[in-house]
Image (cartoon, rainbow, N blue to C red):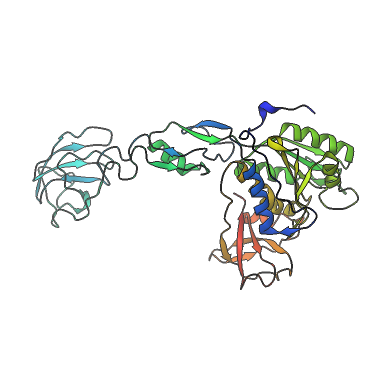
């Protein structure tokens, strides 16, 4: 096996992925998420990269690597919060000039009884007491000569003071914060040109099964691979980069060869299919033969129970391998249970909290396992099951991309559920 160390993320000197193992027994949904996340944080990378603030859309959801501070103040000067008139002293005011955004005021200083026409975002002249909205002014538009506000100087000053939102050196982001659109905009406003982010983990995908096809309608007895397209969409949002995706038939020797190659070249490997204990479910035995140590051997969740997590290698070169079931809805549940928490830990981000919601028409919970069902909001904001909830069915999930997690019977009151989102 050829090591591609230069392509890997690097971990702090001496850092090792410690195994918080649940080998041999299925664990609860939340325990599985926590175990995957802890495994990721134990092997979090210290490889960094810089990305431009004003660049193309990101190929992955980056995460800040360090505290990010502003270079400039926002606003950069005292500016008008709306179109109107910068005024000094009580009404009436004599109109003496104009101030437009991007230009210096025609009149740098207002004396009591003076006003200047001003645009939103324009610098207010020194001596300005307030900005009066143009719709509050008596008389014709555009005004000439004298400006009168029958209500006098407004109590609301309508001025954004220099630095009221951001001062130079103030923090605008912390390590582990996701780099989303608003953070990019804030960084640009604060005068930054680049952001320092964590290097995304490199992920290899292996879809298993002789029955899989990759194009066109499936012939009788064959199945179109729908899991790989799902993972290609979900993985970048988690913060990892897909570097390869391949299909392997039901052949244990070939699977061992391809798994070994993937482990050599990637930071994380995710397989789909062959995850249970059927006659052609080779993943567990092949991983054991390669020396992988089980971390999570199964999850008490329906669907998605056969999902598992193992660790190949030792020390800073360890590679996690997540095995997902071969049915697509079950694979999505497995992704949220093990892959997403693992990746968030690897990039130093927080384990995503699951929002609570009230589910109407909730199915009967299982006595010992969490139940995950596709759900949707109607026009009145009511959350209900879609009706398509079998492990091989994607039709329900495709409606709004929402899954509800129901706790085992007796764990929670009423129909309160937690939501998994596919964005």
Where residue 57 sits: x, y (%)? 54, 36
Q: Is residue 218 visible to us here?
A: no
In this rendering, the answer to whether 99 lies above or below 382 is above
47 to the left or right of 218:
left
Disc tally is 0
Using the image, determine if residue 234 lies above or below residue 246: below
The quarter of the picture where residue 78 lies is: top left
Is residue 357 shown left or right of residue 411? left
Residue 179 position in % (x across, y down): 51, 41
Which image quarter is the N terminus in?
top right
Residue at the right extreme of this rendering? 279
Q: Is residue 313 visible?
A: yes
Residue that extends furthest to the front in the rendered view of this protein:
14
Q: Where's residue 14, x and y in %? A: 64, 35
Q: Quadrant of residue 16?
A: top right
At horizontal 64% and vertical 56% (from top left) the residue drawn is: 399
**Picture residue at 75% right of the left edge, 60% below the top:** 390
For the point 61% across and 65% down, the residue is 417
Of residue 352 and residue 246, the one placed in the foreground of this image is: 352
Q: Looking at the rendering, which quadrant does residue 286 occupy? A: top right
């Amino acid at each position: 096996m050829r090591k591609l160390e230069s392509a890997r993320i690097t971990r702090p000197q001496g850092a090792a992925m410690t195994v918080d193992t649940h080998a041999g027994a299925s664990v609860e949904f939340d325990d599985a998420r926590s175990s995957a996340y802890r495994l990721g944080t134990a092997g979090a990378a210290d490889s960094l990269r810089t990305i431009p603030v004003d660049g193309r859309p990101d190929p992955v959801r980056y995460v800040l690597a360090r505290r990010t501070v502003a270079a400039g103040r926002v606003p950069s000067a005292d500016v008008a919060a709306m179109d109107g008139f910068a005024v000094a002293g009580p009404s009436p005011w004599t109109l003496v000039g104009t101030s437009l955004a991007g230009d210096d005021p025609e009149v740098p200083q207002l004396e009591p009884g003076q006003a200047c026409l001003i645009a939103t975002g324009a610098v207010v002249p020194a001596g300005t007491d307030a900005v009066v909205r143009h719709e509050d002014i008596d008389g014709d538009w555009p005004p000439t000569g004298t400006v009168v506000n029958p209500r006098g100087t407004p109590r609301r000053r309508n001025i954004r003071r220099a630095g009221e939102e951001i001062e130079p050196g103030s923090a605008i982001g912390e390590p582990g914060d996701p780099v989303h659109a608003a953070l990019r905009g804030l960084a640009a406003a604060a005068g930054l040109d680049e952001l320092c982010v964590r290097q995304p983990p490199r992920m290899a995908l292996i879809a298993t099964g002789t029955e899989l096809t990759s194009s066109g309608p499936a012939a009788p007895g064959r199945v179109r691979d729908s899991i790989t397209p799902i993972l290609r969409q979900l993985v970048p949002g988690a913060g990892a980069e897909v570097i390869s995706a391949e299909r392997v038939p039901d052949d244990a020797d070939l699977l061992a060869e391809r798994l070994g190659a993937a482990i050599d070249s990637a930071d994380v490997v995710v397989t789909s299919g062959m995850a249970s204990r059927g006659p052609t479910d080779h993943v567990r035995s092949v991983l054991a033969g390669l020396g992988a140590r089980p971390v999570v051997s199964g999850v008490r969740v329906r669907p998605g129970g056969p999902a598992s997590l193992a660790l190949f290698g030792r020390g800073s070169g360890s590679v996690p391998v997540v095995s997902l079931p071969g049915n697509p809805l079950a694979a999505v549940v497995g992704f949220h249970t093990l892959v997403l928490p693992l990746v968030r830990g690897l990039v130093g981000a927080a384990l995503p909290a699951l929002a609570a919601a009230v589910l109407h028409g909730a199915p009967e919970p299982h006595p010992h396992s969490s139940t995950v069902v596709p759900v949707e909001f109607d026009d009145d904001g009511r959350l209900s099951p879609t009706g398509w909830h079998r492990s091989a069915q994607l039709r329900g999930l495709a409606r709004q991309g929402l899954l509800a997690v129901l706790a085992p019977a007796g764990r929670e009151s009423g129909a309160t559920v937690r939501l998994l989102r596919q964005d």
